[in-house]
Image: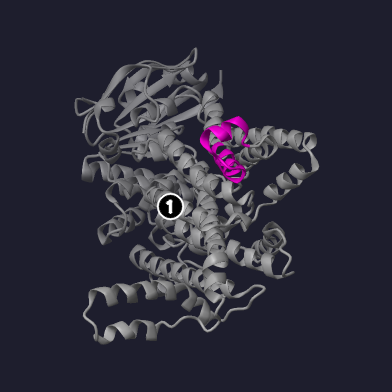
Amino acid sequence: MATDSPADTANKTTVHSLYHAGSTRRIALIAVLSAIVIVSAILSAGIGTVAISPEDTILAVVHPPAVALNAFLAYNLPAGVPVISGVLAAIPSPSNAQAELIVTGFRLPRILLAIITGASLAVAGAVMQGLLRNPLVSPFTLGLSSAASFGAAIAIVVGPGILGAWFLLSNDIFIVVMAFIFGWLSMLLVYGISRSRGTNQSTLILAGVVIGYLFQAGVMALKYMTNNDKLRDIVLWLMGGMWGASWTAVLLLLPLCLICFFLLERMAWDLNALAAGDDVAKNLGIDVEKFRLTGLMISTFAASCCLAFTGIIGFIGLMAPHICRMFIGSDHRYLIPCSALLGAAILLVSDTVARTIMSPVEIPVGIIMYIVGGIFFLFLILRGQGRGLY
Amino acid sequence: MELIVEHVNKEFGKQRVLDDISFSLGPGRILALVGPNGSGKSTLIKSLTRIHDPTSGSIALDRMDIRRIDPIDLSMKIGYVPQHFTYTLYSTVFETVLLGRRRYIKWSVSEEELSRVQAALDALEMGDQAGKYMDQLSGGERQKVFIARALAQNPALFLFDEPTSALDIRYQIEVMETMRRITLEQHSSVVIAVHDLNLAYRYADEVLVLSHGRMVGFGKPGDVLTPGCIRRVYGVESVVIENEYGKFLLPLRAT
């Protein structure tokens, strides 16, 4: 053909070689990102008002299970078996006596919350962008964040009151529950409105934006009417942060978000097919409307679960999928895990900086994330088409 | 594969877009849908792959109503190339074509699927472009990628909605020749909406003329696409020229 260039004819590439080379590079990239998240987590656990070495950090995490294992072995094995003394010799308690309490009691839940939240928001963003074929879609633009804010603001202003007493909810849990319910159900509202006007996805995005503004009006009204203390609480919640970290939050979110992640990952091929347009996707045997609603509900569920505990964390849902697409392409099988890891890394690093840069004073994570992430994103855009894959 | 369409009507709200369409198409045959813009060609094609169902009437593949065929099975039988196509910024040519194999892929992609993608691209002489990004291609090349995606589906019935509209004359002929070859080799049937009446003359076995959603002609191209029909449907005076290469339609002026 006329478009043959010397380079093309010299080393003839086939679909096979392209596909396999692409897969290998994608898996390598995911492995590197995983390593980054793990190393960041270990380093982050050591940084703070009390510095703890990476060895002590790891020991602080693995020592308690080692003690338990040792006790188990001592109970079940006959005395004198060398394994018993070997366990605790291999995994001694950390040299810093406080390490265990600081790491597992305070820092680890916070680190895990940052990882789970960053991953969930990024995955939600990646899936929403794929479902609606729009690169500007994120939990923010679809009104989810505003709705969750409104739910939280109501909870803060009104307090648990009669309803809370009924369900034995404390103030904090009431905020979490309200934020979650409003965040998740807002998607049903947005979808319902868009469906009544046909099935166009721009209508859905517009409905999301409009619903977002309506909830923002509600938040503003509540802020304007309430007293100073509650106003401060609302503002802090809106800024978002990992203050709400606890083992309860982590143990609740981890299974929920993992389930959502696997469900969404299973949708990867159909998400790829949807990129070719609704009509082509239907021709490929996909029930597009059902698929889109299911995907939106699952991704919104994961995002609102996390937002309920952390408050508003913007930007990751928009940015992480974009950066990943630049490096890993648009195959959702890889894009979803890649976004999850990048989102986790971004939020974890930002949160670590936010809590340590002016130690002992913490600053809201959003400030760090928007500045560092924004500059990095701008750099990627200005550098031109970042297409390292093929 | 035999396609039988009987008394199909389609209404959008109060507007009737298709009005009592009936025809049949045998295996290995090419049917050209012609008619002015807005005459219902795209709507008819979309009905055939259940992008939307007709308001009334029936569409059957091998005597089985397509509404009773499992969507997954149906998707293996019908390949569709839309008039307007969509792609994402970071998708490559071969990944786009690979989507045609969606129904045969569970999770990982086998060597056989990749070979089929290669074959589909080669059939349209796009093999050496496999690793390019979609937005690096010209409009015509992109259209060929979407045609390759339908080829990769390996269906019994191809639906093409103006597949050659963005192609220059060389590509048009390439694509039509490829389609002709596939119908001969694989006995697949083709329903193709075209604006170029001479392509219909040259490549179609049958022509269905639509005007305001109604069938105003169905049959062999030479019998249907007469100057009288062109005048009624398009409001254009034309003459048919016949020489050793076949029949050609030359539009003269609007009436």
Visible residue check, residue B243? no
Within the magenta stretch, is there residue A352?
no
Magenta includes A165?
A: yes
Residue A65 horizontal side relative to residue A138, left or right = left
The residue under the point 28% across, 35% down is B74
Q: What residue is shown at x 49% (from left), y 40% (from top)?
A: A296
> Seen in the image, is A383 located left or right of residue B31?
right
Which residue corresponds to the image point at 69% horizontal and 47% vertical from the top-left?
A238
Residue for point 58% across, 75% down: A46
What's under tag 1, amino acid-wise?
Phe
Report the magenta residues as a range: A160-181
| Residue A58 visible, this angle | yes
Instruction: State the image quarter where residue A211 is shown.
Output: top right
Q: Nearer the viewer, residue B46 or A356?
A: A356
Answer left or right for A63 relative to A221.
Answer: left
Q: Which residue corresponds to mark 1?
A: A261
Q: Residue furthest top?
A: B14
In the figure, A58 relative to A346: above or below?
below
- Marks counted in the figure total 1
Secondary structure predominantly adopted by residues drawn in magenta: helix
Secondary structure, mark 1, is: helix
Residue A289: image x %, image y %? 43, 33
In the image, residue A309 above or below residue B214: below
The residue positioned farthest toward the left in the image shown? B63
The C terminus of chain B - image quarter:
top right
**Residue A165 point in image, percent of width and height:** 57, 34
Return the residue nearer the eye: A230 or A261: A230
In depth, the one of B10 and A103 nearer the eye is A103
Q: Image quadrant for the N terminus of chain B?
A: top left
Horizontal and vertical percent position of residue A129: 53, 47
Chain assignment, label 1: A
Identify the colour scheme used: one colour
